[in-house]
Image (cartoon, rainbow, N blue to C red):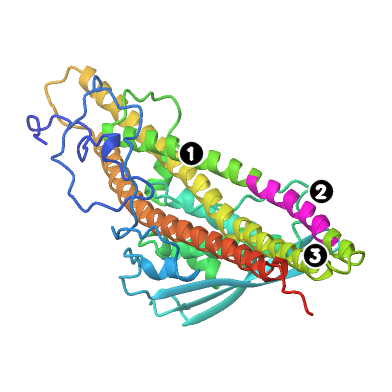
Amino acid sequence: MSGGAAGIPKPLPSSGPKSLREMPHPLATSSSEEMGPALTPSPDLLLPRSIADKDLSLPNGTPVDTSSPASSSSLLNRLQLDDDLDGETKDLFVTVDDPKKHVCTMETYITYRVTTKTTRAEFDLPEYSVRRRYQDFDWLRIKLEESQPTHLIPPLPEKFVVKGVVDRFSEEFVETRRKALDKFLKRITDHPVLSFNEHFNVFLTAKDLNAYKKQGMALLSKVGESVKYVTGGYKLRSRPLEFAAIGEYLDTFSLKLGTIDRIAQRIIKEQLEYLVELREYGPIYSTWGGLEVELSEPLEGVSACIGNCCTALEELSEDMTDDFLPVLREYILYSESMKNVLKKRDQVQAEYEAKLEAVALKKEDRPKVPTDVEKCQDRVECFNADLKADMERWQNNKRQDFRQLLMGMADKNIQYYEKCLTAWESIIPLLQDKPETK
């Protein structure tokens, strides 16, 4: 980017326009190409309104054999995920396990054990074990948003559930939440900046977190403080093209995932209704066999076959509920978190533009840029750099998560249909004509 005359305020930095066609598809492989030369996008540039359709292929480019796999696990053996995000040497490991129910006079709640193992110098001990409840995780998320406003904070699972529909103390619900909380902490642990946050350190190590909470609002970082008090009085003229493209991509991505989530829930609901019918349907053949001596054996075989199909369908529905839906919902919340960071970036840019305009209106002989304007420009540059780095990290995580998710879904469906096929094939000999004994 070419600079102006000495002392003249610089325009907003940008890493160059990036159209939606260049934005990575959720399931496509990443690109390591460098961004183009830095340019200041023109407000007159029109943004494309849709993401280019891309032919999806298998993650590592391996051609797919359309023949039936030799076994249910052969699909997983056929492909290997080539995006290993653990290339860096890890020095911090966090796990969430051992949920326990606490019944008090005023409330009933669940706590989880948070275990930390580390070699970092910031920690006094190599290992910690503390218990935390959901509101503690929420406190951590809020503190991270306040102190690291330029970064993407991983989402938490929704706190509230519809009473009478979901039992929040059931074993299934508690286990689903435990997995989500574990994923939340692992996302933070893997982040090169968030994992060093002082509030995260306290969350992992403090025996009495409530005592720390009562100290009130902790001192925010300078960046956090400046962003916190940016008012809505500044109006952004136009987003740089690459951030506008990110915003439109997130809108499209969350819309598609929301649609998939709703349809998947309807499919699971219909599967469960079908399961109820099958459970009533199978025993009828068994009772019928009691009345038909000559057909007793094949009728019992059909009843057992339907029972096996019921078991296989129940397992498939559980896998969809426990493994497929939570990932969709996490990434829907993730996209909303990214949109919020984009809005904060826009506020800082709008403030910078307003201050630049105010400087330009002052007819002074000295073209010196005020310090507050320079600081504001630094905040914009900080936002741009952090947001782009987090977006790249998010895309890498998303690509690996969705590959694993879809491959797992394919494998579970293969197992389901193989079990049903085996069950029906087992009764064929019972239905064939047998030679009459003389």
In this picture, residue 31 sits left or right of residue 390: left
Q: Which mark is residue 256?
A: 1
Q: Which residue is mark 3?
A: 299
Between disc 3 and disc 1, the foreground one is: 3
In percent of width and height, residue 238 lies at: 31, 25
In percent of width and height, residue 116 lies at: 51, 75
Front residue of 342 and 413:
413
Say if 222 sits above or below 240 in the image.
Answer: below
The amino acid at mark 1 is: Lys
N-terminal-most mark, 2 or 1: 2
Q: Which residue is mark 2?
A: 164
Q: Is residue 382 magenta?
A: no
Q: Judging from the image, what secondary structure is the residue with disc 1 in?
A: helix
Residue at 48% of width from left, 67% of height from top? 201
Q: Quadrant of the N terminus?
A: top left
Q: Quadrant of the C terminus?
A: bottom right
Q: Residues within 10 Å of mark 3 (few under 14, many from 20)?
A: many
Front residue of 84 and 214:
84
The answer to whether the residue labelled 2 contacts the one labelled 1, judged by CB atoms less than 8 Å apart, is no
Residue located farthest toward the right when viewing the structure as drawn? 291
